[in-house]
Amino acid sequence: MRPGWTTGACATAASTAAYTALLTGEFPDPVTITLPKGQTPSFALAVEELDAGTGSAMAGVVKDAGDDPDVTHGALVRARVRVLSPGSGVVFKAGPGVGTVTRPGLPLDVGEPAINPVPRQMMREHLTEVARRYGGATVPGSGTCSGTGAEPGAEPDIEVEISVDHGEEIARSTWNPRLGILGGLSILGTTGIVVPYSCSAWIDSIRRGVDVARAAGRTHVAGCTGSTSEKVAVALHHLPEDALLDMGDFAGAVLKYVRRHPVDRLTICGGFAKLSKLAAGHLDLHSARSQVDKGFLAELARQGGADEALAEAVAAANTGLGALQLCTAAGVPLGDLVAARARDESLAVLRGAPVAVDVLCIDRAGMVVGRAEPRGPGGSDRRR
């Protein structure tokens, strides 16, 4: 499958082209950059604008996410570069469509533009290289010195404003509002490359969600498989938005990160079939990577009092929910048994971290069909 480029790589290409034009009067098109692992992709410019009279230049690159289902695919990432007074260094600014950090817990201070550390470093390195290459040049037509020629290799004195067309609208489909990034998208990327269906962005969002919850003083968070399970967790536990983790299929990502960054209590809430996979020891709940084990459900049903005929019917059921319905009709608490086993598997992954875990299993209508009360390391009951 075809890889793509992160918003951070696009912002680096756009800012490199804009600063080059500011110093030389010409936009490199395509513009080539070097990514952290040494790749050297080239980017065509979608827009360009040189305003020598005000000492600024703007270039834009359309993000190509390759074959990844990325909501920012096709977005126009712009960089406007302006000359600043000597000693200013590189200053980053959020333009239209790029968010601002409003809550602690992220790798950026509150009030900073949501341009992550690696993209900032990439831009600084490329802009410093442009300054070195064209150092001492005068901005065409302005009579203004760029201020970069005195010390070859020194960081230039420029403002870099990154914007994304329609970014505020696109950001509504991301975790940004929940993480306290308001006004638009984040400029992201650690390698510059989007690997199709790598799921790394989702897992990174889970980690940032835990960080934000901890920084806000939350002691109880919920990892939920979808919007219905989120509503159930909120209704039962009255959790604020910043305590909700959009776990999706990545139960393992939540548990492993909470193991290293504990909270007092973790609620896991999701569909019965998905959580039956966690109960069986699977940490990735996606249908392509794990399946509902109806033989496992049959064994749990036996432990819950099912006779052999019912156990065989559970093993032969078409779906996990079908197995649940058979047991419910017979008075066998399969939902509770799955929830309890999922809790125990979660505690095993937590490896003694000081976290109490409870589990809620729901059906498609959002009804709770299985529940396991909070239990901490060593099997201690830690109700709160």
Image (tube, rainbow, N blue to C red):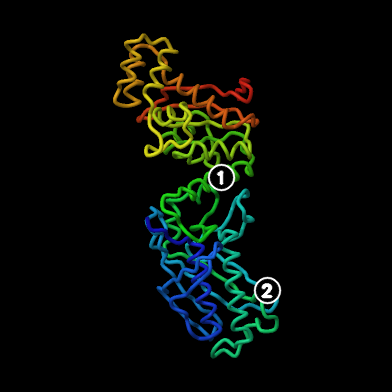
What percent of the width, then of the height, locates residue 91?
Answer: 62, 69
- Secondary structure at numbered mark 2: loop
How many residues crowd mark 1 within 10 Å: few (<14), some (14–19), many (20+)?
many
Give me the C-alpha separation between circle 2 and circle 1. Answer: 33 Å
Give yes or no for contact between labels 2 and 1 (Cβ–Cβ under 8 Å). no
Q: Nearer the viewer, residue 267 or 20?
A: 20
Residue 151, by quadrant, is: bottom right
In the rendered structure, the answer to whether residue 124 lies left or right of residue 312 reads right
Of badges 2 and 1, the one in the foreground is 1
Q: Secondary structure at mark 1?
A: helix
Q: Amino acid at mark 2?
A: Ser
**Residue 141: percent from left, percent from top:** 54, 90
> Which residue is situated farthest in the front direction here?
38
Q: Which mark is residue 88?
A: 2
Q: Which mark is residue 375?
A: none
- Residue shown at 65%/81% (left/top)? 148
Mark number, residue 207: 1
Location of residue 351 in the rendering, given as x and y in whole percent from the top left corner: 62, 30
In terms of depth relative to the viewer, which is nearer, 35 or 356? 35
Vertical order, 172 against 162 (above or below): above
Give the quadrant of the C terminus: top right
Mark 2 or mark 1, which has the lower sequence index? 2
Residue at 41 percent across and 17 percent down: it is 299
Task: Say left or right for 198 vs 258.
Answer: left
Quadrant position of the N terminus in the picture: bottom left
Q: Nearer the viewer, residue 73 or 30?
A: 30
Residue type at mark 1 is: Arg
At horizontal 62% and vertical 74% (from top left) the residue drawn is 128
